Image (spheres, rainbow, N blue to C red):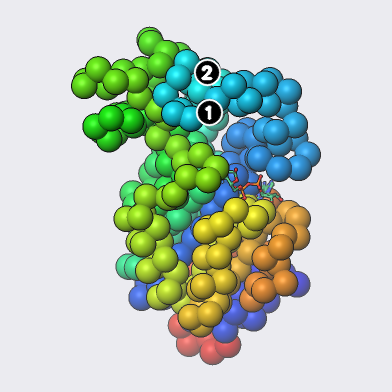
Amino acid sequence: MNLEEFVKKLGLTINPKLHVVVLTGAGISAESGVPIFRGKGSMWENPEARKLASKAGPPWNTRETWEFYEWRRKLVSKCKPNAAHYTLVEMEKYFEDFCLITQNVDGLHGKAGSKNVLELHGNMWKGRCVRCGKIVSLPETPLKNIPPYCECGTALRPHVVQFGEPIDPNVLTAALTACSRAELFFVVGTSGVVSPAAQMPLIALQHGAKVVEINPNPTVLTPYMTISIRGKAAEVLPQLWKTFLLFSQKQEVKF
Ligand code: OAD
């Protein structure tokens, strides 16, 4: 099936009033050179990452934790946003009600120019004070001091959600609210095994959204999707967006 047929199958007329939500995972940054988490070529297959991560632990504001994050920050500092990130910037400009939810902490959506990004798992370019809660921007790598310190004199932790930690309730509420009113939902580059993000496409489906998955591999979410497109985000998303725009210009077309 070509992309035009995928769009027809969705049965939606694309227009700026459509409520659109996009959920991204590590796969959207894969072609920028950021390793995904699971499977071939993933971060957890790299012995250096495993070694550094094994020393990181609560309270997460120690030298060991920052050594792991500095390793990741250095790697990501060399990566640039790709065509998929830039397509989402275009989509944000086009749709009046557009919500971008990401599980990624690499900051590449912001670097591409996306304005409103709900970062479910935080951002590796920020630190957070474990005492006063202040969030501090830490854009440079290597850091001058490891760990970096807050003005209040306490060591910062990375502003990243660790396994077992809760997501910021404001971010989570905003994401769930967007999911419940979505008419069109894209799931891009996630294995769909980490909750609550993994539940979001299903919540959108339950509320009547059409859900489109873009991933080179099938996932646990695939059986539930309205449409699953097998391919790399940086190739599929720009093409799909072009196809959507072509259809939007032919408003007389009835699917
Ligand atoms: P995963 O590593 O679990 O999954 C990445 C997905 O991207 C897989 O389904 C791949 O098939 C797909 N993929 C690979 N290359 C792609 C490409 N070029 N285009 C599109 N898709 C591609 O990463 P996540 O699902 O993001 O949590 O993982 C979720 C969370 O688990 C992460 O946010 C992180 C991790 O532990 C925290 O750090 C809290």
Across and down, in percent, residue 164 comes to 53, 45
- Sequence-first tag of 2 and 1: 1
User: Residue 241, located in which quarter of the rendered image?
Assistant: bottom right
Separation of residues labelled 2 and 1 (CA atoms): 8 Å
Where the C terminus falls, by quadrant? Answer: bottom right
Where the N terminus falls, by quadrant? Answer: bottom right
- The residue beneath circle 2 is 64
The structure residue drawn at horizontal position 48% and vertical position 87%, both measured from the top left corner, is: 252
Cβ–Cβ below 8 Å for labels 2 and 1? yes
Viewer can see residue 19: yes
The structure residue drawn at horizontal position 55% and vertical position 77%, both measured from the top left corner, is: 205
Crowdedness near tag 1: few (<14), some (14–19) or many (≥20) residues, C-alpha within 10 Å: few
Q: Is residue 186 above or below residue 32?
A: below
Q: Nearer the viewer, mark 2 or mark 1?
A: 1
Across and down, in percent, residue 75 comes to 57, 24
Q: Is residue 86 left or right of residue 174?
A: right
List the single residue furthest toward the left. Answer: 152
Q: Is residue 61 above or below residue 228?
A: above
Q: Nearer the viewer, residue 22 or 16?
A: 22
User: Residue 187, located in which quarter of the rendered image?
Assistant: bottom right
Q: Is residue 131 above or below residue 171?
A: above
The structure residue drawn at horizontal position 63% and vertical position 57%, both measured from the top left corner, is: 192
The structure residue drawn at horizontal position 45% and vertical position 32%, both measured from the top left corner, is: 124
Q: Is mark 1 within 8 Å of ligand 1?
A: no
Q: Secondary structure at mark 1?
A: loop
Q: Is residue 17 left or right of residue 84?
A: left
- The residue beneath circle 1 is 57
Q: Is residue 42 left or right of residue 166?
A: right
Crowdedness near tag 2: few (<14), some (14–19) or many (≥20) residues, C-alpha within 10 Å: some
Q: Amino acid at mark 1?
A: Gly
Q: Is residue 184 above or below residue 11?
A: above
Across and down, in percent, residue 236 comes to 64, 56
